[in-house]
Amino acid sequence: MRSLCLSSIAALHALTVALPQPHPDLSIPLIKKSSLSTADGFVDLASIRAHILSTETKLQRGAAAFERNTVAALFSTSLTKRAGTSEIQAGTPLQSFTMDFDTGSADLFLPGTSCRSACGGQERYNPSASSSSQPLGTTFHVTYGDGSGAAGNVYKDTISLAGFKATAQTFGVATNATGFSQEKYDGLMGMSFKSLSHFAADPVFDTLVSQGAVPESVFAFKLASSGSELRVGGVNSALYKGSFTYTPVTEKAYWQINGDGMGLNGKTVVKKFSAIVDSGTSLILGNSSQVKQLYAATNATEVDKGVYALPCNAMPHVSITVGGKTIPLSAESFNLGPVDSSRNTCIGAIQASDSLGSSFQWILGDVFMRNVYTVFDVGHTRVGFADLA
């Protein structure tokens, strides 16, 4: 359920520029996260609703951290998680963990040895076994909308990501947790901006950049049913073709950008919107009124709050335009699958949330990112998109 660049020109509008030069950076293969389907292959509506709720809760926590860190409100109204997973290492000597990489949050969380049965089958960080571990004497508590959560202590230690080491990285170590024992990952690595950090700490990748550990201040995702990858410190030229189209980040909290429009069957239905690009959200979530507007052009039915279904044999062609680049959503990514054995009714991957709209109207999650190679440029505070190879 939890789901998972490089020009010197700083423009107010998105630009298409030449390919960046290759660098000796490293890639991390990603494993597919939890499914929104039942064991027999049908869409689980309860799982979708729980995912929407947990995403809303993540936004609420992020907004609270932003306001605490910047003394500014991120949302004008209150809000009510979690592309792929892979390994990182922590400590001296290194201890390995499978992580969910989330561009919609900022902090690193690991289960600790004292978490015991509450952390189920997760690998656990042992601070006593690391000579570089430093307890900070502070605690944390986080909760998700689906009832899961974690509490524990804050530490500093060495973190290794794709072979690049961040020293004295601040992160949370869970001593108690609920709702995580069946996940395919051990912990969560946030990759957004520091203003969302509950610890007022640099995210791991920002630490790597500030310590000069990576060749370039960018990371990139390819998300797919197989062959998914997180590239650290550069881009993988084998995974995309053509040029990148860049668009500036409008608010350094989430990876928030402006979009040009959303199209359905070749016609623009939603014009000019603000969105965040979030590898930690499985679906595409939109403001309820705009999602209703989008589906109004089809014969979709709202089968649960914010969840829309359509005839399986009449799924629309959906596209999203950002920075002048139109990105079509493949039928495979847009159609989440049938709701029952009749296979007549399927669920669309664009769903609605009442919590969106004051700061940004859309969350472009894994469903969007599976259709484009996405680069997050920390150094130039922008997001880039290129066609998949």
Image (cartoon, rainbow, N blue to C red):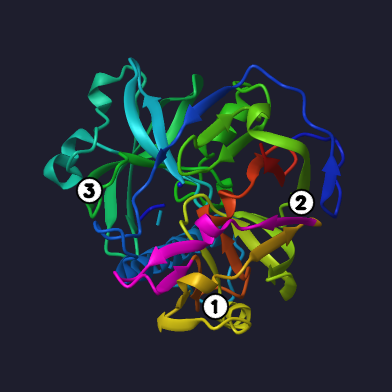
What kind of element bears circle 3?
Answer: loop
Q: Which amino acid type is marked by label 1? A: Thr
Location of residue 36 by image quarter: bottom left
Q: Which numbered circle lies on residue 77?
A: 1
Q: Amino acid at mark 2?
A: Thr
- Tell whether 339 sits left or right of 355: left
> How far from the left and from the top, in percent, is residue 128?
23, 23
Nearer to the camera, 240 or 141: 240
> For mark 2, what is the residue?
247
Q: Which residue is mark 3?
A: 182
Mark 3 neighbour density, 10 Å: few (under 14) some (14–19) many (20 or more):
few
Q: Residue at x 56, y 47 (%)?
A: 192
Query: Element type at marker 1?
Result: loop
Inspect the image, locate mark 3, and give the three-letter code of the amino acid beneath it.
Answer: Gln
Name the N-terminal-most of marks 2 and 1.
1
Mark 1 or mark 3: name the one nearer the start of the chain: 1
Q: Residue 116's mark?
A: none
